[in-house]
Image: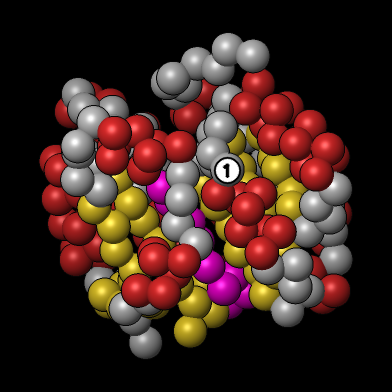
Amino acid sequence: MRIRTHTNPLSYKQRFEKLSTYADPQAYEALDFEIGFGQERFMLDYAQQHPQRLVVGAEVRKKAVELMQEKITQRNIPNVIALHGNGHICLEDLFEDATLDALFIFHPDPWMKRRHYNRRVVTLQMLKVAAAKLKPAGRLYISTDVADLWEYINELIAASGCFDAAQDDGFWRDFYSTRWSDIAQEKQRTVLFGTFSPRAA
């Protein structure tokens, strides 16, 4: 199945119902969300390793969502939900405030041309929404192998005033594994990553 490398997320305007439409979050001990899971294995592996957590993902590439849904069925993983659409909209619509335990953004499309910066996953508005949706002890996990994008993301995080740097070495050591991190390693590119916590009001 061929999946397009880049898809403009702004092309997707559909709204989402609340999470209870798709699953009962009360049946789980924790709630996690990944924006842009692509062809990655992280979401499936993480959900299998943490059956007590409900893991939700949004992806703009429809074929990637269909492939993910097939894998969920094949591997019989009940605590995963894969949705097609804009991750920003999904974050706004699906989750109540202060309910997310973790938000994952791994190797997002860099959209290197300045006129396309508004297509990037991490924006000031997204960070403000993310801070509201995360629990006070929640975590935002971000990675990329594009140095310019990493600098841009950190500038936005600082400008937002919504997050502080946090430590979670165990997560990056024991659970973080994606197709793109493997490619970066093969091509000897440095993977840049960080953990952030919502700043107390």
Label 1 crowding class (10 Å Cα cut-off): few <14, some 14-19, many 20+?
Answer: some
Pick the residue in front: 21 or 40. Answer: 40
In x, y percent, where is residue 169?
Answer: 35, 74
* Total numbered circles: 1
Q: Confirm whether residue 166 shows in the render.
A: yes
Indicate the quadrant containing the C terminus: top left, top right, bottom left or bottom right.
Answer: bottom left
Residue shown at 55% from the left, 17% from the top: 3
In x, y percent, where is residue 175?
Answer: 50, 62
Pick the residue in front: 35 or 116. Answer: 35
Residue projecting furthest to the top: 2
In x, y percent, where is residue 45?
Answer: 63, 53
Q: Is residue 111 above or below residue 108?
A: above
Residue 80 magenta-drawn? no
Residue shown at 75% from the left, 67% from the top: 51
Magenta span of residues:
95-106
In x, y percent, where is residue 198?
Answer: 39, 77
Amino acid identity at mark 1: Arg
Residue projecting furthest to the front: 186
Indicate the quadrant containing the N terminus: top left, top right, bottom left or bottom right.
Answer: top right
Residue shown at 61% from the left, 64% from the top: 32
Q: Quadrant of residue 165?
A: bottom left
